Amino acid sequence: MSKKIERITNNILEELNITKLPIPVDEIAKKRGLDIRAYDLGENVSGVLVMESGKGTIGFNPTESKVRQRFTIAHELGHYELHKQDNGFFIDKEFKMLFRDHNSSTGEHKKEQEANAFAAALLMPEKFVVKEIKNHNLDLSDEDSLKELAKLFNVSVPAMTYRVTNLNLF
């Protein structure tokens, strides 16, 4: 599934002609037909995808860091792109919600793992990561290099660490 997710995110970036960093996740979600809104979701919920009558809205927790908000929006977009046709997730003309909470980040459920992989691939596309490592002559064993790379992509250092590890770039 991870190769499929990489293909899907690369196709989205190509289709929307996105070539600069950081990846404009809000713009992508809007161009894919989703509304994005800040919601007071409480302290344990990062985001929500609400589907109603075939229209989707991503809600994010405005009290969290900007990098967390970006990952949450990408994660919910992942659910929309990957799971909107799944039974139990998207049923036309019914109101359905899926929350991103602390359990989501553990990736315990298959759909959560897929949405996390989608978010990582969208926000930190492999070809962009490899290009920036070369352009900035970064040594990934150095914490400062990882911080610089995370800053370029406007993601958290842990998210970037997971991504470069999963891409076998260490």
Image (cartoon, rainbow, N blue to C red):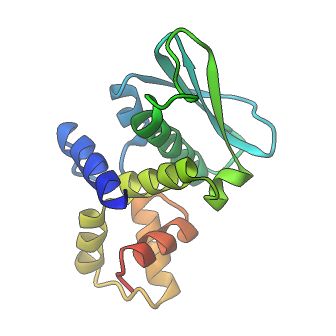
Residue 78 position in % (x across, y down): 45, 42
Q: Quadrant of the N terminus?
A: bottom left
In this picture, residue 80 sits left or right of residue 11? right
User: Is residue 22 in view?
Assistant: no
Residue 26 position in % (x across, y down): 44, 36
Q: Residue at x 39, y 86 (%)?
A: 170
Tell me where residue 43 sits by quadrant.
top right
Q: Residue furthest right?
A: 43
Q: Is residue 112 above or below residue 3?
A: above
Residue 109 position in % (x across, y down): 61, 53
Q: Could you say which is closer to the camera, residue 110 or residue 138?
A: 110
In this picture, residue 153 sits left or right of residue 56? left
User: Is residue 129 in view?
Assistant: yes
Q: Residue at x 75, y 31 (%)?
A: 40
Residue 38 position in % (x across, y down): 64, 30
Q: Is residue 74 above or below residue 103?
A: above
In this picture, residue 23 sits left or right of residue 162? left
Q: Residue at x 37, y 51 (%)?
A: 122
Q: Residue at x 75, y 34 (%)?
A: 41
Q: Is residue 19 above or below residue 26?
A: below
Q: How many marks?
A: 0
Q: Could you say which is closer to the camera, residue 46 or residue 84?
A: 84
Q: Residue furthest front?
A: 87
Q: Is residue 80 above or below residue 102?
A: above
